[in-house]
Image (spheres, helix red, strand yellow):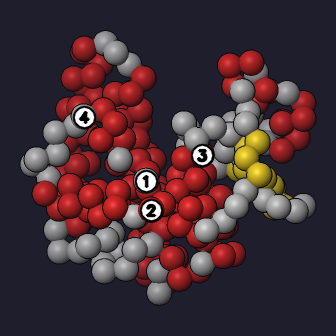
Amino acid sequence: MIKRYGSKMSSVFRCHILAKELGLDFEEVPVNMGQGEHKSAEFLKLNPNGKIPCLVDGDFVIWESMAINSYLTAKFQPELLGTTIEKRALLDQWSYWAILYPQPHLFSLVMNQDADAQATAKEALLPYHRILDGALRDNDYLLGDQFTLADINVGSVMMINNLVGSDMAEYPALSAWLNRLMARPCFQ
């Protein structure tokens, strides 16, 4: 059985969403970071970075949530990777974009209670919301009319807007896309 290390209240969440979409069962191995379990010699043998998530599939070990999701999708449901090399490239583009640009600001909204920091993070998110809204204006999903891993990877980041109560009224295409994602069992 595949083992997945880490808490769902972290980047493991995007792996959890994918596992639900694929119908996979995992042995979930909690890693208590507060007690330093991620820095234990045993865990560092799996992930020398001392970070979660980490996945063990037989003798194969992989870490980093985006890499884990690519691996699992390729192994169990490759059609979620897109139908062409160009769509696969766009899937990667959107996935990396989400963790590099909007995710740090959304995490700041979750983790930082300082009013000035919150205002700065909200302001910094505006261009990314506009970009994503524009990309979804004529499409149901990021790669067109097909739900793909891009929607899981980017959606797992953008749904933090719901958690922090972001006003998404200015972004109707983005809001509609988030609603479509939230209606899927894997996102619930």
Whether residues under marks 2 and 1 lie with C-beta atoms below 8 angstroms apart, the answer is yes
Residue 108: x, y in percent? 38, 27
Q: Is residue 158 left or right of residue 18?
A: left
Give the percent coordinates (x, y) of residue 35. 74, 18
Q: Residue at x 44, y 56 (%)?
A: 187
Circle 4 packing at 10 Å, graded few (<14), some (14-19), many (20+), is few
Q: Which mark is residue 9?
A: none
Where 130 falls versus 86 (above or below)? above
Residue hosting label 2:
185
**Left or right of residue 124, residue 167 in this image:** left
Q: Amino acid at mark 3?
A: Val
Viewer-side label of 1, 4: 1
Q: Is residue 64 above or below residue 143?
A: above
Taking the image as drawn, is residue 109 in sight? yes
At x 90% / y 61%, what residue is drawn? 59
> Of discs 3 and 2, which sits in the foreground?
2
Between the C-alphas of marks 1 and 4, the distance is 17 Å
Q: Earlier in the sequence, mark 4 or mark 2?
A: 4
Residue type indicated by callout 4: Gly
Furthest-bottom residue in view? 84
Q: CA distance from mark 4 to mark 2?
A: 22 Å
Mark 3 → mark 1, Cα distance in angstroms: 15 Å
Q: Which residue is mark 4?
A: 165
Q: Which residue is mark 3?
A: 12
Given the current orientation, which residue lies at the most extreme left position?
170
Q: Counting residues from the N terminus, which is met first, the one under dot 3 or under dot 2?
A: 3
Residue marked by disc 1 = 188
